Image (spheres, rainbow, N blue to C red):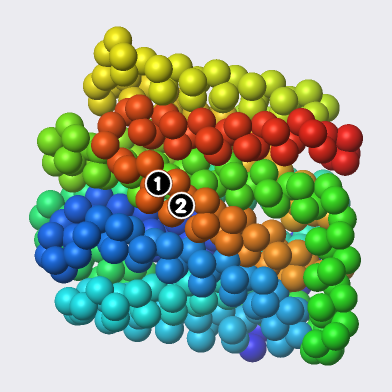
Amino acid sequence: MRIIEKEQDGIGTLLAFLLIPLSGLATDIYLPSLPAMAKHLQATNAEVQLTIVFFMISYGISQLFVGSLLDSFGRYKLTIAALLLFSIASFSIANSHHIYLIYLMRVIHGITVATIVVGKRAYFVDIFSGEKLKHYTSLFSIVWSAAPIIAPFFGGYLQTTFGWESNFYVLGVFALIMVLLELIFGGESLRTFQNFHFKSIIKVYGSMLKTTSFSLGLIILGLTNSVFMVYGMSGPFIIEHAFKLPATTTGYCALILGIALLLGGFLGKATLNRPFFKKMIIAIVVQLVFAILMLLSPALHSSLSTLMIFAFVIHFIAGFIFNNYFSYCLSLFPKNAGIASGVTGGSIYAITSILSYGIVYTIPANGQASLGMSYLVLITLAFLIFFTTRKKVH
């Protein structure tokens, strides 16, 4: 097994950036297929949406624990095993016609993706330090936004041409290709292995969560990520049922909102050293105004164009907020990079899974007003939490 030297592995860094978006890819690619899956599996919209929730819950909870395993046993071997299991689960879904088996495979997806993504985020802390580490961590949300840009657009055409199963065949093949590349070019990045002592690990978790600025950041990240996920769960049904448009249109709309997320991430990176509170409060207030306008505007006019204009601005600002907070949280505990990466990612998805499904279940996806109301709830919560605890953020 090759040991990766500090500051020297360009191919390893490229592989890490290719795998970081896997959490989004594993869901975003089949978002345009949700209505078709519901019809084919004879399931309700809520039952098919649960395939996303099961992934998010298992992905989130797993990240809370896999970080300690990665710090104790290394990144490389666990990543290879997780990629192989992910591929098997993907092919199983593609050949399944039972919603409950798909739920089980999506749980396996969540566990394996957590292992892969947490390990690859920790890789950067293993290899880089100082300003270079800050540079790379600020790119995480930008790279992650590649999935919502490319995956639904590609998935819409896969759905139209080959059916919903093709999305999971693509995921399985991608994972096998990454296994091959890891075997050829990959290696172990962890230099110092931590002893696996359960009590000491729990103590580290407790110390992190007691850090108010860190805990606050996790809540804001979960609320911001829920903005993306609520659209992902509601958008296909609004576009394909309310507006009577094809799955390819869903893909194009997801592409546009993915670009919004990417641009917001770039702005977040460009302003990383600006005063934190000032830029965050401006961003959240502007986002809140657009959510209110989105909710009220259907009284005058409602169309796919107006929905997308409001959603674009809201997702752009969400990308900006997410980039700043994610980089901030991930850099707080460099001595326990695997655990910090896992707690950050796990908490985000645990919060997101609860909030997003609760909102789409409570507010049915039937048009622009319903999506605007969903956005408004999330952004208002973010505003209240951030503003009332702003003195804890440094």
Look at label 1 and name its amino acid. Answer: Thr
Near-viewer residue (24 or 303):
303
The reply to whether residue 152 is in sight is: yes
Q: Which residue is mark 1?
A: 362
Find residue 35 and name its label: none
Marks 2 and 1 sit apart, C-alpha to C-alpha, by: 6 Å
Q: Position of residue 165 (x, y in %)?
A: 19, 68
Q: Position of residue 237 (x, y in %)?
A: 24, 44
- Say if 312 sits above or below 393 in the image: above
Query: Quadrant of the rendered structure where residue 193 is?
Result: bottom right
Say whether residue 192 is left or right of residue 241. right
- At a point 76% along the width and 47% down the height, the residue shown is 216
Q: Position of residue 145 (x, y in %)?
A: 49, 46
Say whether residue 48 is left or right of residue 354. left
Quarter the C terminus occupies: top right
- Circle 2/circle 1 CB separation < 8 Å: yes
Q: Residues within 10 Å of mark 1 (few under 14, many from 20)?
A: few
Near-viewer residue (369 or 177):
369
Q: Residues within 10 Å of mark 2 (few under 14, many from 20)?
A: few
Q: Which residue is mark 2?
A: 358
- Say if 200 sits above or below 301 in the image: below
Look at label 2 and name its amino acid. Answer: Gly
- At a point 45% along the width and 17% down the height, the residue shown is 293
The reply to whether residue 186 is in sight is: no
